[in-house]
Image (cartoon, rainbow, N blue to C red):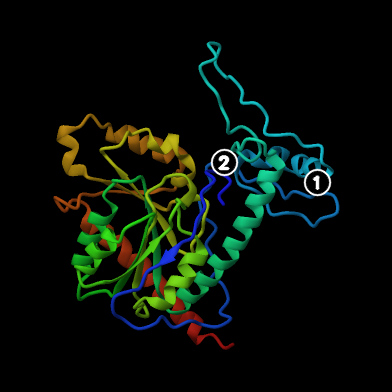
């Protein structure tokens, strides 16, 4: 269950078409991430100490403010349900359900209970993600988590990318959707191995799904793994899959205010692809404003404007991929040369 959206359900991992099983490095240590690998929009808080427990890892954002008190109250049985939302405008036209330490609201559940559930779920997920990351890093595989709203053009952009990479860089794809295998079939038509994960009621992929999918894919050492997440700008931001980078795709058919409406996703990404730029002559989309909003959330965010239809920006996108892949291959070679 996700405490943000309440999603749940059994995930089904589909069969990959062709290829050999991925090699796994048993007990390989997790590859260290650079300090700027995950950009935070809000400042990180200090560690929380709950009476009788070891200090907990700092929670992201302003949830830290009253987390300890909420958790202690929940254990003492004195915590009530989530606080009533505040009206921040004089005309009382604004209800804000994201001001508590959990930054979410579930009827009948306290903020402390939500924090405890989220801590347990994300803690387990992060451990599985670290194992995925170690496996991929040991083989010099660059894994990218592609995230966006539904209909942003992720699959079309990915198809164009794979066509340009053909014969140059080996690649494989994991497709995430609630139902159907349509996108995986589009990928397989390019000759690239693709595995479909259907999440049922779930609105995001998680590290366990990816870990179960990796052995069933044709992953070549020193290659690329594209993970196309479920179309959703909320929950995928919180779930590390073991990827090297999150790449957020924003289509010009959406509003330029998306980065401010869904800041966690843009804060977690290393690269934003502003997609479907061939449609700009027909739309009222303010590109400078969209870029300003995205950089306000994440000043370190890199941006490339792209179009799968016209080909705009694809050379820059491929250059970005090749540079990161070279880093992954170099790190794997150094790890292999280091005595155990």
**x and y percent of residue 1 in the render?**
57, 52
Q: Is residue 226 above or below residue 51?
A: below
Relative to 227, 120 lies left or right: right
Examine the rendering and report whether any part of residue 80 can be seen.
Answer: yes
**What residue did someone put label 1 on?**
75
Q: Nearer the viewer, residue 283 or 304?
A: 283
Sooner in the amino-acid sequence: mark 1 or mark 2: 2
**What residue did someone put label 2 on?**
42
**x and y percent of residue 11 in the render?**
46, 61
Relative to 191, 201 lies left or right: right
Examine the rendering and report whether any part of residue 32 can be seen.
Answer: no
Q: Is residue 270 above or below residue 103?
A: below
> Label 1: how many residues lie within 10 Å, few (<14), some (14-19) or many (20+)?
few
Rendered image quadrant of residue 333:
bottom left
Residue drawn at the location 52% of the way across and 51% of the way down: 238
Distance from label 1 to label 2 (Cα)? Answer: 28 Å
Q: Nearer the viewer, residue 185 or 67?
A: 185
Q: Nearer the viewer, residue 205 or 56?
A: 205
Q: Helix, strand, or loop for circle 2?
A: loop
Residue drawn at the location 51% of the way across and 59% of the way down: 240
Q: Helix, strand, or loop for circle 1?
A: helix
**Tag 1–tag 2 contact (CB < 8 Å):** no
| Nearer mark to the viewer, of 1 and 2 | 1
Q: Nearer the viewer, residue 199 or 97?
A: 199
**x and y percent of residue 95 in the render?**
55, 23
């Amino acid at each position: 269950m996700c405490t943000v959206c309440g999603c749940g359900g059994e995930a089904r991992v589909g069969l990959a078409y062709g290829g050999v099983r991925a090699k796994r490095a048993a007990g390989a240590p997790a590859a260290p991430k650079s300090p700027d690998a995950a950009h935070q929009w809000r400042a990180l808080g200090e560690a929380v100490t709950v009476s009788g427990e070891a200090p907990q890892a700092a929670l992201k954002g302003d949830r830290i403010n009253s987390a300890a008190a909420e958790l202690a109250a929940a254990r003492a049985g004195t915590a009530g349900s989530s606080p009533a939302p505040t009206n921040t405008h004089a005309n009382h036209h604004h209800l804000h359900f994201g001001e508590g330490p959990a930054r979410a609201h579930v009827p009948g559940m306290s903020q402390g209970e939500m924090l405890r559930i989220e801590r347990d779920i994300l803690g387990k997920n992060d451990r599985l993600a670290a194992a995925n990351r170690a496996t991929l890093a040991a083989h010099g595989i660059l894994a990218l988590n592609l995230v966006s709203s539904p209909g942003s053009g992720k699959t079309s952009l990915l198809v164009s990318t794979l066509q340009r990479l053909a014969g140059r860089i080996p690649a494989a794809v994991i497709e995430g959707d609630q139902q159907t295998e349509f996108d995986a079939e589009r990928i397989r038509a390019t000759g690239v191995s693709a595995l479909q994960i259907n999440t049922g009621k779930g609105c995001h992929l998680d590290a366990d799904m990816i870990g179960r999918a990796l052995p069933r894919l044709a992953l070549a050492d020193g290659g690329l793994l594209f993970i196309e997440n479920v179309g959703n700008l909320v929950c995928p931001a919180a779930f590390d899959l073991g990827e090297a980078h999150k790449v957020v795709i924003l289509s010009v058919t959406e509003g330029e205010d998306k980065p401010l409406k869904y800041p966690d996703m843009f804060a977690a990404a290393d690269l934003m692809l502003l997609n479907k730029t061939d449609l700009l002559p027909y739309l009222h989309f303010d590109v400078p404003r969209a870029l300003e909003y995205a950089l306000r959330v994440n000043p370190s965010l890199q941006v490339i404007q792209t179009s799968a239809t016209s080909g705009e920006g694809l050379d820059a996108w491929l250059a970005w991929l090749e540079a990161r892949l070279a880093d992954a291959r170099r790190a794997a070679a150094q790890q292999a040369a280091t005595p155990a």
